[in-house]
Image (cartoon, rainbow, N blue to C red):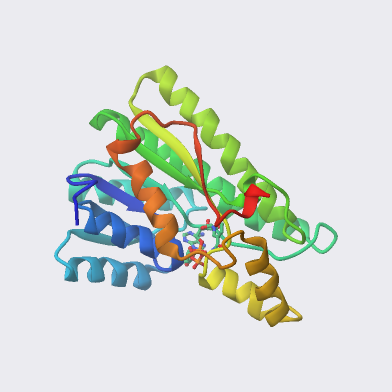
Amino acid sequence: MSNRVAGKVALVTGAASGIGFAVAFMLAREGARVVATDIDEEAAKKVAAGIEGEGAEALGLRLDVAREEDWRTAMDETMKRFGRLDVLVNNAGVALAKSVLETSLNEWRGIMSINLDGVFLGTRYGIEAMAPGGGGSIVNMSSVYGMVGGLGVAAYCASKGGVRVFTKAAALECAELNNNVRVNSVHPGFIETSMVNDVIRESANPEALRKGIEYQMALKRMGEPSDVAAAVLYLASDESRFCTGSELVVDGGMLAR
Ligand SMILES: NC(=O)c1ccc[n+]([C@@H]2O[C@H](COP(=O)([O-])OP(=O)(O)OC[C@H]3O[C@@H](n4cnc5c(N)ncnc54)[C@H](O)[C@@H]3O)[C@@H](O)[C@H]2O)c1
């Protein structure tokens, strides 16, 4: 532990699983007090208990990122417990492995409400909470599929492309307001989490799909959640103080071709 985010208060969405789980623990191990949130309240509380078991301070809360009232409550609870917010990781997201022709309007709206409305609401409430405390860092989880198209994941690509450019617009606004809030996006390639494993398991030929995914990565393997958490840690810390509106790709070389 080197205390790279010592003294900071960090809220992580979708912290019960995969990348969010790794981010919550990594930030705590580097000195942050962590608000671990998820749509699954029990699981969020378990993460917070696990972090406290390691000797750091944590709070576990239910937060459905698509519900504005949940954001209000989460910010109130964070202020009550810790009195400030320095880092917000808008990580929660869902995938939909369907082509344009297979996607219903309801499914499209469902993806947008979590992946895009969730990031908008978080950024909005995050800026409001951070600015009075002297600023902070917002990290929005996009994807390589926010930069290029993927076959059979059109709605997901649209949502993640939205996160990418929304992040830049919000960063410009914060810079203009001179509020010391930085906003950046992270773009993982395929990472070994339940999101990817579920898509593989439910596919017609899981073995071939896994091989195909691994082949797309120049490093010939999927990443680990901690590979992405390390990028988030950098953007959360003051080491990245000159980065805003930037996009950090963590993709095993997938987009290098
Ligand atoms: N795994 C990958 O290969 C990959 C690649 C690029 C980007 N991402 C992005 O990383 C983020 C995390 O993905 P992951 O792979 O860890 O997925 P995951 O499925 O392992 O975890 C997602 C978490 O988000 C929670 N969640 C779902 N809907 C929610 C909601 N409405 N409000 C709050 N929490 C909610 C789930 O309960 C779960 O704990 C997502 O935004 C995803 O799009 C993942």
> Looking at the image, which is closer to me, 157 or 225?
225
**Is residue 39 in sight in this rendering?**
no
> Looking at the image, which is closer to me, 149 or 10?
149
- Identify the residue at image location x=58%, y=75%: 197
Q: In which quadrant is the N terminus drawn?
A: bottom left
Residue 196 appears left or right of 27: right
- Identify the residue at image location x=48%, y=57%: 92
Q: Position of residue 58 (x, y in %)?
A: 22, 60
| Name of the residue lying farthest toward the left | 55
Q: Position of residue 79 (x, y in %)?
A: 24, 45
Residue 180 appears left or right of 156: left
Q: How many marks?
A: 0
Residue 5 appears left or right of 91: left
> Looking at the image, which is closer to me, 156 or 189?
189
> Looking at the image, which is closer to me, 121 or 188?
188
Q: Position of residue 188 (x, y in %)?
A: 54, 54
Q: Give above or below for 160 relative to 48.
A: above
Residue 47, image quadrant: bottom left
- Identify the residue at image location x=76%, y=56%: 105
- Identify the residue at image location x=75%, y=64%: 98
Q: Position of residue 231 (x, y in %)?
A: 41, 49
**Is residue 75 in sight in this rendering?**
yes
Residue 244 appears left or right of 247: left
| Name of the residue lying farthest toward the right | 101
